[in-house]
Image (cartoon, grey):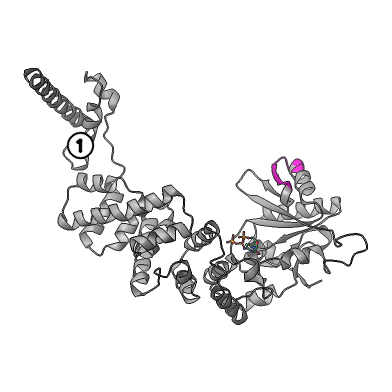
Amino acid sequence: WGRRKNITSVLAEQLPRDIIELLRRLGELGEELGYKVYAVGGFIRDLLLRRPNLDIDIVVEGDGITFAKAFAERAGIRARCHKKFNTAVLIFDDNLKVDVATARLEYYQYPAALPVVQFGSLKMDLYRRDFTINTLALALNPDEFGQLIDFFGGQRDIKEKAIRVLHNLSFVEDPTRILRAIRFEQRFGFRVGKQTASLIRHAVKIGLIERLGGQRLFHEIQHILMEEDPVPAIRRMAEFGVLGVICPSVCFDAKAEETLLQIKEVLSWYELSFLDEPLESWWVYFLGLLSRLPHKDLQKVMERLDLAQNMRERIAWTFQRVNQVLGDFLRLPHQRPSAIYRALQPFRPEEILFMMATTQREEVRRAISHYFHRYRHVQPEIRGRDLKEMGIPPGPVYAKILNRILDARLNGEVRSREEEAALARRLAWRELEAGEGKESHVHGS
Ligand code: CTP
């Protein structure tokens, strides 16, 4: 039955009271329906590591869908069921969700056949998982609530800070685990075990990564880049030969490392300065990884990762435009605010941060910093309807006038609504004259 020990004191110490209550209620319902219910996987791993994680996964020895429906009805919440996989998601109001999986109870392929599965269905479910640290389970039924169940040495490996697979075919079964091993290793400051490391090397050597579909591979890379500090994980990918397999010219030399470290620095600067502006930092690292590829290899990698067409176009556009803008900045280092604004405004913040990380020039970095801090949210106080009220006939001229006012505002040439309005009148007048000039020219010709 695996090693068991009671960890209710850890639960009380680590989890909010309402979550413990929720776990108890899940166990009570299981008991009523005659099912055993367990919380499993990353949630338990992180509980033991004292890392906050409220992504709760439960396994029901019984019918997960019946269980989820009954729970949802009782709690007055929604359950989204996936009949095909016998799984469900309980969706609570406050963003909390509980994933419910079914551990099948059939032990025999047909009546009187030998048991296909020699151990209980929870154990079977856990045996299919990637690493020992993800195979811990917590019993939730009332008479055993809080018992930690450890079939495969998960506690030992957490203590030894080791990432270990459960069996030698694990990477053959699912090659994405190669990248998951690296991700968990770096996230927790663990080390891939010796035997597991040689299985990874072997798997890379026999071409298992090549067999992965582009989208799955991209998804795993994206997950690595989403980690708090992806740089050591990227280094580790290179060590295991994973980067080289994705594209021989994506390498992790001193220059690549320097770029990634610059990105890290720029990102922490941005995140500290703009605490509540959402940022997809993985995208900046991704651009950093791709940025040193020759054009042809870039196309190959994008193809290999099966990136959506619009993403490919955006990446190519970014590299081209970033070079242009950096070139312009170098030629004219002291540009006016409006020129800086016009140069940077077409980019997403992630792309500008990539640009910032790839240049060492102090004046360029300062210009970018000014853009983020001072320019990007500047808007004229007057709007189109104000121009209308001034009696300016609507038309394309509005955009022209409003743009000029924005430039003037950025450059400090106008500082109030009144000054903006005065400028609008002058500009409208000038446009009108120019228009009439053109007209008489046309008539005259
Ligand atoms: N799993 C697996 N093989 C995979 C993906 C997932 O065996 N290729 C198992 C893992 O054991 C994991 C569980 O499915 O515990 C849930 O997967 P996921 O949510 O990706 O893992 P977490 O451990 O919760 O990781 P994270 O903290 O990154 O969400």
Where residue 110 appears, as percent x and y from the top left, is 88, 59
In the displayed image of the protein, which residue is found farthest to the left? 444
Q: Residue at x 65, y 73 (%)?
A: 165
Residue drawn at (32%, 62%) of the image: 357
- Return the residue nearer the eye: 370 or 22: 370
80 or 304: which is nearer to us? 304
Disc 1 residue: CB within 8 Å of ligand 1: no
Whether residue 268 is visible here, answered yes or no, is: no
Task: In this rendered view, identify the residue nearer to me: 305 or 30.
Answer: 305
Residue at 75% x, 72% y is 151
Q: Is residue 391 visible?
A: yes
Q: For the view shown, which residue lies furthest in the right direction?
A: 112
Residue 360 placement, left or right of 253: left
Residue at the image point whose x is 70% and y is 75% from the top: 153
Answer with left or right where residue 373 lies relative to residue 250.
left
Q: For ligand 1, give the image quadrant.
A: bottom right
Q: Quadrant of the C terminus?
A: top left
- Specify the amino acid type for callout 1: Arg
* Region in magenta: 73-83
Give the side of residue 367 with respect to residue 21, left or right: left
* Place of residue 213 in the rendered image (x, y in percent of width and height, measured from the top left): 55, 59
Residue 330 located within the stretch drawn in magenta:
no
Q: Where in the figure is residue 220, as x and y percent of width and height? A: 53, 61
